[in-house]
Image (spheres, grey):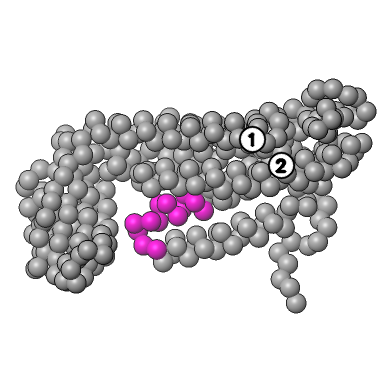
Amino acid sequence: MKLKLVPKDTTFDFLGSWRITFSFSLAMMVAAVIAFLVMGLNFGIDFRGGTSIRTEARQPVDVGAYRAAIAPLELGDVAISQVYDPTFRDDQHVAMVRIQAQEGAESVPPAVLAEVERALREVDATLSFSAVESVGPKVSGELIRAAIIAVVSALAAVLFYIWLRFEWQFALGAVAALVHDVVLTIGLFAALQIRFDLAIIAAILTIVGYSLNDTVVVFDRMRENLIKYKKRPLIDVFNLSLNETLSRTVITSVTTLLALLSLFILGGDVIRGFVFAMMWGVIVGTWSSVFVAAVVVKRLGVTRDWSKGGDSDQGGKKGGTQFSTS
């Protein structure tokens, strides 16, 4: 017996209440922008600056014990990760400890570094500091600009790609969905004050790719049905397409969320922010493919057959793109 998450031949009216769902998405975006402007992001070491410490020890690295030893010092954002390299000796165990810049200073003072060294040596007496590097506010500002450029460039590339593959209406619909996903993700991190670092930027770019993939699948089916059903109202064709791709959308989202949930529970603190952003991105990406991208294309209207100039949404009229009023 096959497991079916979605019944066969569903007939859900996804766009029947598009004004309500689209208004809800807009309201969420406005709330996200307000949260960002009022509360701001809780930038991590990558963006705020700080000090990176490379440690070496003959005993295996215990990230949990390192973190517990440093916690009483109350140094703010501290990131600890083990470093793997095939060139390391069997008794060479390396870790990176990153500590955010302290109030009124561009780096961690020597006295604080001495306290950190003392605390870590209580965990492992063989531990030594092999390198200490500081990242100042100037470098952090450059990282912020680079992150913004990366996200904007990704959205621009998506706009160009979808425009070439489909029509400009689909391109605008896809970009609207991606902007929706990015804005809501940033707004959530601002509202919950979750640490925002380069890993979250990577998560946002991954969300863009995931959401785009889901949107393109839906758009492909819409294009097929627009050519196949030239006389049916546009909203009916779109609902049919969304129902036909519903099973694929649900299965992909559920399996992805199951894998991410396992990582969130068992993956540890180092990747928890990244995984949380991905989980949120899968949810909002699935929503935006149906209730944002499809609604934008519906409102703009599209031709029925690109290869022949096509019948418009009104049926029977030849020529360029017509705007839907349904």
Report whether 100 appears left or right of 143: left
| Span shown in magenta | 267-279
Image position of 293 (left or right of 274): right
How far apart in space, not on screen, are marks 1 and 2 (Cα)?
10 Å
Viewer-side label of 1, 2 = 1
* Residue 12 shown left or right of residue 170 in the figure: right
> Horizontal and vertical percent for residue 242?
75, 47
> Residue 23 location, x and y as percent?
67, 34
Residue 29: in magenta span = no
* Comes first in the chain, label 1 or label 2: 1
Q: Amino acid at mark 2?
A: Phe
Of residues 310 and 262, which is closer to you in this image? Answer: 310
Give residue 77's position: percent from left, percent from top: 26, 48
**Mark 1 secondary-structure assignment:** helix
Element type at mark 2: helix
Residue, x 67% and y 36% (percent of image)? 165
- Can you say which quadrant of the picture contains the N terminus? bottom right
Determine the image quadrant of residue 169: top right
Residue at 48% x, 32% y is: 153
User: Are the two marked residues, 1 and 2, in contact with CB atoms closer than 8 angstroms?
Assistant: yes
Q: Quadrant of the C terminus?
A: top right
Query: Residue 156 appears in which quarter of the rendering?
Result: top right
Decide: is 210 above or below 3: above
Query: Main structural element of the magenta stretch: helix, strand or loop?
Result: helix
- The disc at residue 219 is 2
Above or below — where is 3 with respect to 82? below
Spot occupied by residue 40 in the image (x, y as percentages of width and height): 39, 34
The numbered mark at residue 162 is 1
Residue 192 in view: no
The amino acid pointed to by label 1 is Ile
Q: Is residue 176 left or right of residue 279?
A: right
Confirm whether the magenta stretch covers residue 277. Answer: yes
